[in-house]
Image (tube, rainbow, N blue to C red):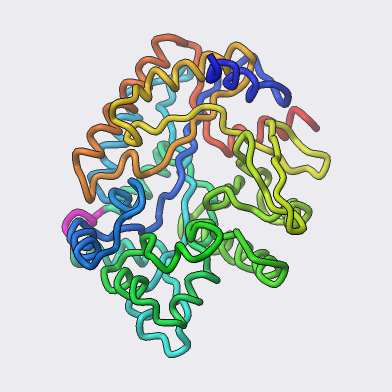
């Protein structure tokens, strides 16, 4: 009952529509987390315990991940005969592991995501053709990438650990991975929260990182981003007034989140609407995480939330993560996640034949235009 009440509360207020709109907002594409099953074994044997499923199963999407995902997206059609579409919130950069380990200044050296795919394709069969597959997905309208930051880790934490030659970090880097290591846990926030901070000095550096990331995103994915969702959803309140000046039209937000402002933590609640400053807020109101708990019926859970969203005339913005569809470490994990995705998609079009599949960018433009 509590969940049912919450599902209704998070759809109150904000932009409404009579159209049955479905979008999939899926975080973490384009980023390296765990290199391989061998890397996981090496780290585990060295005493580094993986944290949750992201450190155990999440890896850069390979060719099979993408081919099987695309097959499922094509397997359904909406009222306009369009296939389902993912909005992968993607990153344009990864760690250049060799250059970073050799860096005389002990600082992180980045490479483009396209370069990461190229390097892996040269040494691993599963990555041959993966980047070309990515581009085909964009061209076919199955993937509509949006901006998830330049890198999916906190640069200040990384550089501090690297400068101190933290053994856990060095071991992870030698294994072409960047999972949570013991040294990360000495900080007040998670290493994946790229824009979490310890004060104004760090916050002042973020706009430059974001603008550089937006530029690199366009170069890598050959499309201008319209929507930005920060890694781990941490975003300083102090930057809210700067965001409208960046080359985006919308921010993707959780329904409710605690944010730090002037040293104090406060809960913020968001609804889908266009703000007075011209920026649009897109809010996720459906959760679909099929591999988080195999004993939990993620399809039923998502269907109930979609039903509430449509009843209250809201688009159903389905929140998920790449790890649910990642099979480089565990093909069984990918099979489980994709089977649930296929089941959900077919149930959606059977229950609501009038449904329309849209991307986050398309939704942002709808909200912006109807408030002009």
Examine the image and state in which quarter residue 131 appears. bottom left
Front in this rendered view, residue 305 or 187: 187
Residue 205 against residue 49 in the figure, above or below:
below
Residue 162 against residue 151 in the figure, above or below:
below
Q: Residue at 28% across / 30% down in the picture?
A: 294
Q: Which residues are magenta?
A: 124-129
Measured from the top left, where is residue 174 in percent x and y?
28, 74
On whether residue 127 falls in the magenta region, the answer is yes
Please indicate whether residue 187 sits to the left or right of residue 294 in the image: right
Measured from the top left, where is residue 286 in percent x and y?
51, 27
Residue 169 against residue 31 in the figure, above or below:
below
Front in this rendered view, residue 226 or 7: 7
Q: How many numbered circles does the render carry?
A: 0
Quarter of the picture holding the C terminus: top right
Q: Residue at 65% across / 21% down in the picture?
A: 9
Q: Residue at 19% across / 42% down in the picture?
A: 331
Examine the image and state in which quarter residue 337 appears. top left
């Amino acid at each position: 009952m509590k969940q049912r009440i919450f599902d209704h509360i998070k759809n109150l207020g904000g932009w409404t529509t009579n159209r049955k709109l479905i979008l999939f907002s899926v975080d973490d594409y384009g980023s390296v987390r765990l290199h391989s099953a061998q890397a996981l074994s090496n780290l585990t044997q060295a005493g580094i315990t993986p944290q949750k499923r992201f450190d155990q199963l999440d890896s850069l999407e390979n060719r099979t991940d993408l081919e099987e995902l695309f097959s499922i997206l094509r397997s359904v059609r909406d009222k306009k005969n369009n296939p389902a579409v993912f909005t992968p919130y993607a990153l344009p950069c990864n760690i250049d592991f060799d250059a970073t380990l050799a860096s005389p200044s002990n600082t992180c050296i980045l490479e483009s995501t396209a370069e990461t795919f190229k390097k892996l394709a040269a040494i691993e069969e599963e990555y041959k053709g993966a980047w070309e597959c990515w581009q085909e997905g964009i061209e076919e309208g199955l993937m509509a990438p949006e901006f998830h930051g330049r890198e999916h880790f906190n640069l200040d934490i990384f550089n501090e650990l690297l400068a101190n030659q933290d053994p856990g970090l060095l071991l992870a880097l030698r294994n072409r991975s960047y999972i949570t290591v013991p040294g990360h846990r000495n900080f007040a926030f998670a290493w994946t929260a790229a824009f979490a901070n310890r004060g104004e000095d760090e916050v002042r550096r973020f706009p430059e990182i974001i603008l550089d990331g937006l530029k690199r995103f366009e170069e890598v994915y050959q499309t201008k981003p319209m929507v930005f969702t920060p890694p781990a959803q941490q975003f300083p309140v102090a930057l809210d007034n700067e965001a409208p000046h960046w080359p985006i039209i919308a921010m993707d937000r959780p329904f409710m989140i605690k944010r730090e402002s002037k040293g104090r933590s406060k809960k913020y609640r968001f609804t889908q609407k266009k703000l007075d400053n011209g920026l649009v807020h897109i809010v996720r109101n459906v959760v679909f995480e099929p591999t988080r708990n195999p004993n939990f019926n993620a399809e039923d859970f998502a269907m109930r939330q979609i039903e509430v969203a449509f009843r209250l005339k809201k688009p159903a913005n389905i929140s998920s993560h790449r790890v649910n569809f990642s099979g480089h470490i565990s093909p069984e994990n990918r099979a489980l996640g994709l089977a649930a995705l296929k089941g959900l998609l077919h149930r959606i079009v059977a229950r609501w034949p009038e449904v329309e599949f849209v991307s986050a960018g398309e939704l942002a433009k709808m909200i912006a235009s109807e408030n002009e």
